[in-house]
Image (cartoon, rainbow, N blue to C red):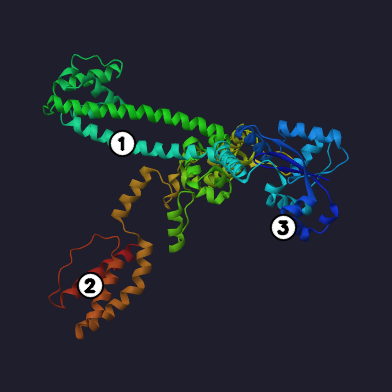
């Protein structure tokens, strides 16, 4: 059996002298307690030394990735030509498959091989002659530093640190720009206050101030490259009648320096945004298509790296950035937040407030899928993100139009959307149902009204008068003697029922009981005359 052992100095191939000593895995370490015992078990057959650190780094990188370097391939071909029947013990099973495929050597990887490698590593100084311990230590240290530097440079986990730094710097630049622009507007506003209301764009304001300087120069200066014609005319007219105070040249020069800073920072901010956009499309193209560059970069920065973000479930991605509101809601037993940083995505922003929660949940689920595809997948295209976004937009349109369209279909047949037809019936209000009186012509109505005024209704009065006249007489006799107050009220009620159709008489306070019976007697006479006429 042959053993392939990789060192910092080169490739070493050992031959096992006594395989019987390797039968017991637990007792192999006893055979490597001293260099003398180790030389009785294995013997160095071939050693291929590296020329420099670059070659050693290339070989180590190939072994880490499970590939064969050129030098190793040459060495293995020499061995395969001489001793093709021998088995090769290796530490990596993946590398063994590649060697068997390329060189046609049978490879062995087991627990016994692992213990054998450990014993060789302990006694490597005694087994390889011609290399001092000091040289081996220096080569191992140099190779370790080079390999770490290589991994740090080309690791996919570390590339997204540039995105984290870029989005943090972008936010800081926005804050500084706002402070600088606010200070510039306030400072120059003392000299020319009307300019701030006319020019609303911050960058155009600073460029105008930087180009012109003093307010007096606006009348003769050409601002056609910076402003439209209407705005330029308005600025020149306002400069002539400005209410601002006069300032010295030193003040103007300091304001101009501040404008230079604002312009430079704005240009650098635009350059940084383009850089961030390109980096996001290279590292996380599907996430960028779904939520945009800024939101995707903020999600990666919040999680720490793209790989850490890929480990989060969709529910965490949805509320990432709203941790304070989440824990406050859990503490006070209120509703938890529906969205965090994902709220600033374009799909959530264009949704109505009623559907923002639904679309943010769906977007977070698809974004979690896209993040894992970007972090762990081998493809770098944005096809998955484009398809997912199209589905989300279709779902969003369905939610917005819900209620306007009716979806019909069964499990076997495809659902189809019926065309919306406006079916409205115009109903006219019928006023005939308001009145319960029979409809009569106007002439007849006028005649009936005149007759009613001349002759009161006879039938109704007869029925009401016959039973009511007799108790009135009895009540009058009792009233003359006792005069109770309750009887008077009853009399008045009865009188009002009898005299419904007659004109109301003026009520006068009764001074004596002798006046009421005289009026009653007159009414009785009238009633008797009416009966005689009938």
- Which residue is the site of mark 1? 178
User: Rounded to the nearest whole Å, what is the CA distance between mark 3 and mark 1?
Assistant: 71 Å
First-in-chain label (3 vs 1): 3
Where is mark 3, residue-wise? Answer: 33
The answer to whether the residues at label 3 and label 1 have Cβ atoms under 8 Å apart is no
Tell me which label, 2 or 1, sits earlier in the chain: 1
Q: Which residue is drawn at 73% across and 41% down?
A: 12
Where does the image place residue 200, in percent across and percent down from the top left? 29, 29
Q: Is residue 417 left or right of residue 197?
A: right
Q: Is residue 362 left or right of residue 510?
A: right
Residue contact at pointers 2 and 1, CB within 8 angstroms? no
Is any atom of residue 230 visible in this view?
yes
Q: Is there any visible trace of residue 418 in the rendered image?
A: no
Residue 399 rendering spot, x and y as whole percentages = 55, 42
Q: Nearer the viewer, mark 2 or mark 1?
A: 1
Element type at marker 1? helix
Of residue 440 and residue 300, the one placed in the foreground of this image is 300
The quarter holding residue 26 reads bottom right
Which element is circle 3 on? Answer: loop
* Residue drawn at the location 82% of the way across and 36% of the way down: 79
Which secondary structure lies at badge 2? helix
Mark 1, Cα crowd under 10 Å, few <14 / some 14-19 / many 20+, is: few
Asked whether 376 or 113 is in front, the reply is 113
Q: Where residue 521 is drawn, which disc sits there?
A: 2
Residue 329, placed above or below residue 46: below
| Residue for point 37% across, 39% down | 172
Mark 3 vs mark 1: in front: 3
Q: Which residue reaches farthest right?
A: 85
Q: Say whether disc 3 or disc 2 marks the residue closer to the N-terminus.
A: 3
Residue closest to the eye, 420 or 340: 340
Q: Quadrant of residue 259?
A: top left
């Amino acid at each position: 059996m042959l053993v392939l052992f990789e060192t910092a100095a080169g490739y070493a191939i050992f031959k096992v002298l006594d395989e019987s000593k390797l039968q017991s895995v637990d007792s192999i370490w006893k055979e490597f307690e001293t260099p003398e015992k180790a030389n009785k078990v294995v013997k160095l057959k071939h050693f291929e030394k590296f020329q420099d650190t670059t070659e050693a780094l290339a070989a180590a990188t190939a072994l880490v990735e499970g590939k064969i370097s050129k030098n190793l391939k040459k060495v293995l071909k020499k061995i395969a030509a001489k001793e093709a029947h021998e088995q090769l013990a290796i530490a990596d099973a993946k590398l063994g498959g590649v060697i068997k495929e390329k060189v046609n050597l049978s490879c062995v990887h087991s627990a016994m091989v692992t213990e054998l490698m450990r014993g060789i590593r302990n006694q490597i100084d005694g087994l390889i002659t011609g290399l001092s311990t000091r040289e081996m230590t220096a080569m191992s240290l140099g190779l370790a530093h080079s390999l770490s530097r290589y991994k740090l440079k080309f690791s996919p986990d570390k590339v997204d640190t540039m995105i984290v730094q870029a989005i943090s710097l972008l936010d800081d630049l926005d804050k500084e720009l706002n402070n600088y622009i606010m200070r510039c507007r306030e400072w120059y506003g003392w000299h020319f206050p009307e300019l701030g209301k006319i020019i609303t764009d911050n960058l155009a304001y600073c460029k105008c101030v930087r180009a012109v300087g003093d307010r007096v120069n606006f009348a003769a200066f050409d601002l056609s490259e910076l402003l439209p014609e209407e705005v330029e005319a308005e600025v020149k007219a306002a400069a002539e009648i400005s209410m601002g105070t006069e300032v010295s040249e030193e003040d103007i020069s300091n304001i101009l320096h501040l404008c230079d800073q604002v312009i430079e920072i704005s240009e650098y901010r635009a350059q940084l945004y383009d850089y961030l956009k390109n980096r996001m499309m290279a590292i996380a193209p599907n996430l960028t298509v779904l939520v945009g560059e800024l939101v995707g970069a903020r999600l990666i920065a919040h999680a720490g790296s793209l790989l850490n973000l890929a480990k989060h479930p969709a529910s965490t991605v949805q509320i990432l950035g709203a941790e304070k509101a989440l824990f406050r809601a859990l503490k006070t037993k209120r509703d938890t937040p529906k969205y965090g940083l994902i709220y600033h995505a374009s799909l959530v922003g264009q949704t109505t407030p009623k559907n923002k929660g639904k679309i943010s949940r769906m977007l977070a689920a698809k974004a979690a899928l896209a993040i894992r595809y970007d972090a762990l997948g081998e493809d770098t295209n944005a096809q998955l993100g484009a398809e997912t976004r199209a589905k989300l937009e279709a779902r969003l349109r369905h939610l917005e139009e819900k209620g306007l369209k009716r979806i019909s279909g069964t499990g076997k047949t495809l659902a189809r959307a019926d065309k919306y037809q406006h079916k409205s019936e115009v109903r006219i209000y019928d006023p005939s149902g308001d009145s319960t009186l029979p409809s009569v012509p106007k002439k007849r109505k006028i005649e009936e009204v005149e007759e009613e005024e001349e002759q009161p209704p006879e039938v109704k009065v007869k029925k009401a008068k016959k039973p009511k006249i007799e108790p009135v007489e009895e009540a009058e006799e009792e009233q003359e003697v006792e005069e109770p107050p309750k009887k008077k009220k009853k009399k008045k009620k009865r009188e009002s029922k009898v005299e419904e159709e007659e004109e109301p008489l003026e009520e006068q306070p009764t001074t004596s009981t002798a006046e009421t019976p005289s009026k009653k007697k007159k009414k009785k006479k009238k009633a008797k005359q009416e009966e005689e006429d009938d």
